[in-house]
Amino acid sequence: MDWTLAMLIEHLPQHVDILIVGGGPVGALLAQTLSASGHDVLLVEARTEVGKDPRALALSHASQIKLQQAGLWHDTLLATPINKVHVSQAGTLGRTVLDAADLDLAELGCTVPYQTLAQSALDALKAGSTPLALGVKVTAIKQMAAFAYVKMENGTETGSSEHQLTCRLLILAEGGQLISQLPDIRQQVKSYEQHAVLAKLTPKHPHLGIAFERFADDGPLALLPNGMQYTLVWTQTPEQAAARLALNDEDFIAEIEQRFADRVTGFTAVAERASWPLSLKTLNSVVGQRVVLIGNAAQTLHPVAGQGLNLGLRDAETLAQVLAVTPKNQLGEAASLQRYRQLRARDAGLVTVFTDSLIHLFEAQSLPLKHARSMGLMAIDQLEWLRKGFAQRMVYGAR
Ligand SMILES: Cc1cc2nc3c(=O)[nH]c(=O)nc-3n(C[C@H](O)[C@H](O)[C@H](O)COP(=O)(O)OP(=O)(O)OC[C@H]3O[C@@H](n4cnc5c(N)ncnc54)[C@H](O)[C@@H]3O)c2cc1C
């Protein structure tokens, strides 16, 4: 199908039953899953291609299966298996290892570059059966009793075109940029006053699919196996992040090696350094009049536990299940929206609290607290039921 932009906006309908805004991994999963439901769906996505993005995402085995089943998984994704996750605290002996074998899995999950995952999602949408408007940005929304009203535009070199439509149900999977236009939804933003320093590190020896989470005194560091390299996610204050980005390669590597001590065997090169401001964004409700918010639009988490997209994909999966059994004339009505909200409350709440607590738990550096944390890591490592339960939550979420 030829999705030239001008043609697209001209041919968009005046009304659809379900409008999905945002064709990132979460919106794409929902659209692909809903395509078999028989509902009248349109997905609007601002991008036509995914630009460069430094993120590498740790996806659980369960997320990988969801993406595969929805046709969003390609060999070109450059996914790197994660077999074990090694969690430790600098300066103490406490450590725990989560192992795929504990859950009778070949892999706990994998690392995927955000850019290739999002591009693969976009390509699958282009080839799929869900009507699609690419390069079209939603600019205004208005909630009404019987429908939501949505205004959108595309911009080309020769000018811009606008379109307006109504829908019974508006699903925001756009990362949260339109929330301020919803009078019945309030967003709480908690800035961590931290940045994630991202970089690609080449290890001296093959990584063997082992990921590391290290709680150092000045902030947690994660190493995710990514191809032959590791992607580093290093939480720092904005000032520290700026200083680290300015270091020469040798000094940058020395800083990382010092924080990992003997846990990893060292690095030969560093590339693609970047930084990303971090905050926690939550909503008073993920549903409003004629509206549902999913993925990062519903909750944006600190990347310390690598849970944001995993959680968002479970939002999409559950919403698709609810909508599959909702009759056309009840789409967007309060009863089905509340049903979705109830189904997602526990998982989203627990993962959000867990991720936020992890930051604060490892923040304080008094000696007794460090010992207590060290004992905690040892306990998880020694008690099989605790370790398995923890790994289970990380892979499948809390249901
Ligand atoms: C440094 C870092 C590391 C991370 N690591 C992990 C990890 O290891 N594991 C994990 O699970 N998660 C991780 N995350 C979180 C993860 O990146 C997000 O949860 C995920 O990308 C959210 O997907 P989404 O589809 O909801 O939103 P997005 O990926 O943001 O997609 C939103 C889409 O909506 C489109 N859009 C936006 N506005 C409009 C509009 N007005 N009209 C039309 N379209 C619009 C955008 O173009 C985009 O395609 C990390 C995040 C960061 C910052």
Image: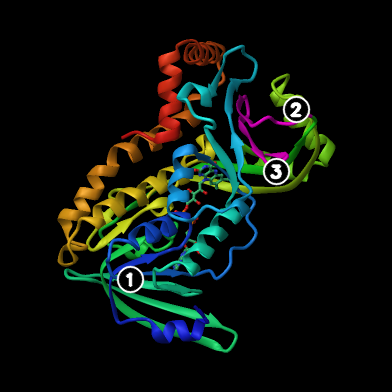
Q: Specify whether tag 3 is near ligand 1 (CB below 8 Å).
A: no
Q: Position of residue 70 (x, y in %)?
A: 43, 54
**Helix, strand or loop for disc 2:** helix
Q: Residues within 10 Å of mark 1 (few under 14, many from 20)?
A: many
Q: CA distance from mark 3 to mark 1?
A: 38 Å
Report if the CB atoms under discs 3 and 2 are less than 8 Å apart: no
Q: Position of residue 42 (x, y in %)?
A: 36, 70
Name the residue type under label 2.
Glu
Q: CA distance from mark 3 to mark 2?
A: 14 Å
Q: Quadrant of residue 153?
A: bottom left
**Helix, strand or loop for disc 1:** strand
The numbered mark, 3 or 2, whose residue comes first in the sequence reads 3
**Is residue 227 on the magenta stretch?**
yes
Report if the CB atoms under discs 3 and 1 are less than 8 Å apart: no
Relative to 1, is 388 above or below?
above
Q: Which residue is mark 3?
A: 199
Q: Which residue is mark 1?
A: 141
Q: Which residues are magenta?
A: 205-230
Q: Which residue is mark 2?
A: 257
Name the residue type under label 3.
Ala
- Does the image show residue 203? yes
Residue at the limit of the structure toward the bottom, as seen here: 158
Name the residue type under label 1.
Ile
Q: Quadrant of residue 93?
A: top right
**Helix, strand or loop for disc 3:** strand
The numbered mark, 1 or 2, whose residue comes first in the sequence reads 1
Relative to 223, is 320 above or below?
below
- Does the image show residue 356? no
